[in-house]
Image (tube, coloured by chain):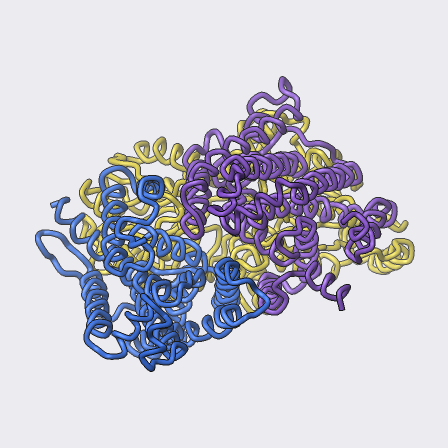
Amino acid sequence: MQFWQILIDGFAISALYALGATGFTLIFGVSGVLNLSHGALMVAAAVAAWAAASEFGTGSYLGALIGVLTSLVLAFATYFIAVRPIQNSKRIAEREKEIFILTSTLLWGIIIQEVVAYLFTNNAKTVLPIIEGVVVFLGVRTPSNEFFTAIVCWLVIAVLWLLVNRTKAGKAVLAASMNPRGVTLLGFELSHIYLAVWGVYGILAGIAGVLLGMFLGVSSYSVGPLTASAFSIVVLGGLGSVSGSLIAAYVVGYLETLTAYLVSPAYRSIPALLLLVLVMYLRPQGLFGRR
Amino acid sequence: MTISQQPFGILAGAVAVALGSAMLLPVPAQAADPIRIGVIAEAQSVAGSSIPQAAQLAAEEINAKGGVDGRKVEIITYDNHSSSADSVRAFQRAVNEDKVNAVISSYISEVVLALEPWASRLKTVLITPGAASDVITQNIAKDYDHNKYTFHGYLTSSALAGLVCDAAKDLLVDGLKMKSAVIMSEDAAWTTPLDAAYEKCLPKIGLKVLDHIRFSPDTTDFTPIFNKIEGQKPDVIITGISHVGTQPTVQWKSQQVPIPMLGISSQATNSTFWKDTNGAADGVLFNAVSGPGVAVTPKTLPFVDAFQKKFGNLPSYAGYTSYDEVYYIAEAVHRAGSLNSDKLVAALEKTDYVGTIGRVEFLPKGDPHVHGLRTGKGTITGLMLQWQDGKQVNLWPANVANGKLKFPSFVKTASH
Amino acid sequence: MMRETFASRPFWFGLIFVALATVLPLGVSGYILGLLTIAYYTAVFAMSWDLLFGFAGEVNFGPTFLIGLGAYTAGILDARFSPGLSLWICVLAGALAAVIGGVLLALPALRVTGPYFGLITLVAVQLLQSFVVVFASLTGGEIGLSVPDVISIDAGVNYYLAFGFMMVSGAILYGLSRSSIGLILQASGQDAVQAGALGFNVAKHKLAAFIVSAFFSGLAGALMVFYMGTASVGTFVDISVGVQIIIAAVLGGRRTVIGAAIGAVFLIGMGEFLRPLGELATLIVSVMALFVILFFPDGFLGMLRGGARA
């Protein structure tokens, strides 16, 4: 009974982690940007969905859509406000651009977080789930929403895989992540590819944020931990490796769930942190990094 | 803030003389210094924002009646951004710069504990309207002569646990014949004494404690916790949560945990809790010092009305205590006949004042909770509210109850 | 180089600042002094961070790991052994603990770089925070630790101590950054392989940078504990505190040491100035910081220098 329970709960939470980390690693792979406003985007999406559904009575479907759109708009805003000006700047040395983008996206995340807190207070919010009720599966009573979360996450990841591997634009993105100059030779405008990737990223982060809001709930305090967890998963899996992040998401998700069930919920995040430190020492490029 | 005190005093004196004959209090004819009260609170949080507002309301009411012995009450407010560092800075400013006679501060134990040594160092009365940690009064008991300037104007964690047990006995043990409980609380310093007191008082009222689960305050996924609790098959979950609230409540409902929750859930006292949880709060039982429409004392409802009229929303729990504190500080100044801190402490220790949440009396020197509030019948009993269909309904104590116990359909209780 | 320093505009601004700061307690209220006391300690945090980042090129997201170690070690020792143990010994022990933490951080830094190292520092902060919360009986947990002793309750004394401390550590850090050690660090930060090929012992210099940075961070943290009489996660360890320090250093101008101090004083002062706006204050400060980073990447000091050049 407990075995199945851990299996089911761990699967759902890991799927959510995987979706959150996929967008993060995609952006890094293609444009070399570590977007530290990631958590803020997810929270903004969830809070927008909550506000639409609960404050303005749009219902859960339209609410969820508004949440994802919010994240999409914010992703483009992140790119145009906090990333592109630095990439194009002539006054910042190339090798320093990384730390500048880290700092600017961090600040941008704080700005989003403060606006959310100002408009909707610091109190935690939960998005009205699309599916309510519970199902008994393998003797475990599980909220239907948990299955819904896992299914949506994997559907989105599958669609993303198809986009990247089976369409021309997707292949260009893939090529861009390997060799930006080569893509321009093939006749693709690099800036168009960046825009497309940021758009896809915004949608992924938005879906992950809204699902998180339905599943566990968010507050403006979640911004830091969400960014940190995406960052850890992506580094654990190997920066830029999408499949690596997916596996790392499951490693972290199950490690946390096991700790919470078998040891104590109070120590939930500690083993994953220690694992991360250990991997950093032994294999700095991450489990599946291609350095 | 640096109004020249001379003309102000004369004016206040003149007003006092004019009104003197109509007043019950003896009014000295000479000018007197105003009573300056500093309020250091969390302006941006739901619980903290009521603290300065309620204090201001009390001061205006007192001043409208001519003040105390010709003294006006002045409130000087500081926002501490929920930070103890900012609070320490504000406290220093309040005492050294703005020359306050007493400070009312914060609903966060961390902040009050940071200020307590400063109250001793700067010899200035400090009263908290909302922090719960027992350590505040323990520090006074440990070194009374040094720390006597601090007063605990809200219930300590162990007192809160006692009130929860009192309510659980009437509602659950006598009412629903419940026999067992699991304690579920966030891992924080305020819950350490709370849990210890729960473990002591629950068996006494006839609830066997099957397990005791403490979880980190930054927990977001409560699935493992509820699963574990359900495995123990208790009749009720006794809660001790404040930093978290929305998330466990929503997950309790989405997983349809069949066990009712009763105890301390600070966030549930907010009027926005229903919306924040999308209605998952339905059926949640929580301790509070006040509730909508509940006349704990004759002063309660007039205060709520006046507050709502002035600020457009309902006061948080710390608003009630902050309002009372201004009144009994003013009363203590009257009895002490002085603004001297030591005399003020002596006068406050003799407080016997019926406020908005009950009768306020401080425990005497020698008690392990010296300067904490006396609780129980005849003083402060607290209430046990339940969220029902978007409203907070009071169930306990019976004499001020305005509803009946009601649970959502997924909750199973023995008597159903 | 000496003559250039004396002729430069920043130098004269600096001199005016020192003169003003010295006579300040005569003119302003205790509250302003208290504010500046905190600002000066924060300035030391930021300068120490700049030595690591600006010169050694290490992306350290966790300055609060070192600060927190110093603050909590000093605080816990004092809380445990109060009258028996001098406050100053506690302060030194705090600095020592931070140095040990600095060496621990330096080990991975010699192996991994860039975002990988950044993540390790982030994890270090989170682990320290978990430690403080889990061992609440020792550390005071999330409520915070009350410290029985304070340096002084007189605002003037605290002000001069903090000011003197900032000037001395600033001078040492600045001197170090302008010495051959600073140049080697800078070279190794830009291209470690090349610096190694030139015969410099990169590892030794980086380790030294970590130790110095940790020492001053820890010392400042410990002193600040005995200024405030309390240590809490929200003041000394939380990631948001580290973010503030990083913003201060970048805002003032990286790789200048002095700029970090200016940025810190500006940030604290601005936060206070905007206080009447309540919760909007953080938002406005963040927007301003983002603006500076985007349009004046060399920070305030860069603006000054730019002005001098033009």
Residue A104 placement (x, y as % from top left): 52, 63
Residue B177 falls in image quadrant: top left
Q: Residue furthest left?
A: A138
- Image quadrant in which you'd find residue C252: bottom right
Looking at the rendered image, the quarter that the C terminus of chain C falls into is: bottom right
- Across and down, in percent, residue B207 comes to 27, 37
Single out the residue that lies furthest toward the bottom. Answer: A187
Identify whether C99 is placed above or below B80: above
Q: A138 or A252: which is nearer to us?
A: A252
Note the chain letter of the purple one: C
Identified at 50% across, 57% down, the residue is: B295
Seen in the picture, residue B202 relative to B413 is either above or below; the reply is: above
Where residue C104 appears, x then y in whole percent?
46, 34
Q: Look at 65% across and 44% down and name the residue there.
A: C177
Q: Please tell me which residue is depicted at 31% across the width and 77% down the height of the picture.
A: A59
Q: Outermost residue, top direction?
A: C84
Report whether A224 appears left or right of C156.
Answer: left
**Direction from residue C225 to residue C130 in the image, left or right:** left
* Colour-to-chain, blue: A
Q: Is residue A45 visible?
A: yes
**Residue B151 falls in which quadrant of the image?**
top right
Q: Which chain is yellow?
A: B
C180 or B52, which lies in front?
C180
- Give whichever of B239, A28 is nearer the camera: A28
Residue B370 left/right relative to A19: right
Instruction: Give the mark count.
Output: 0
Say if residue B130 shows up in the picture: no
Report x, y in % for residue C181. 62, 40
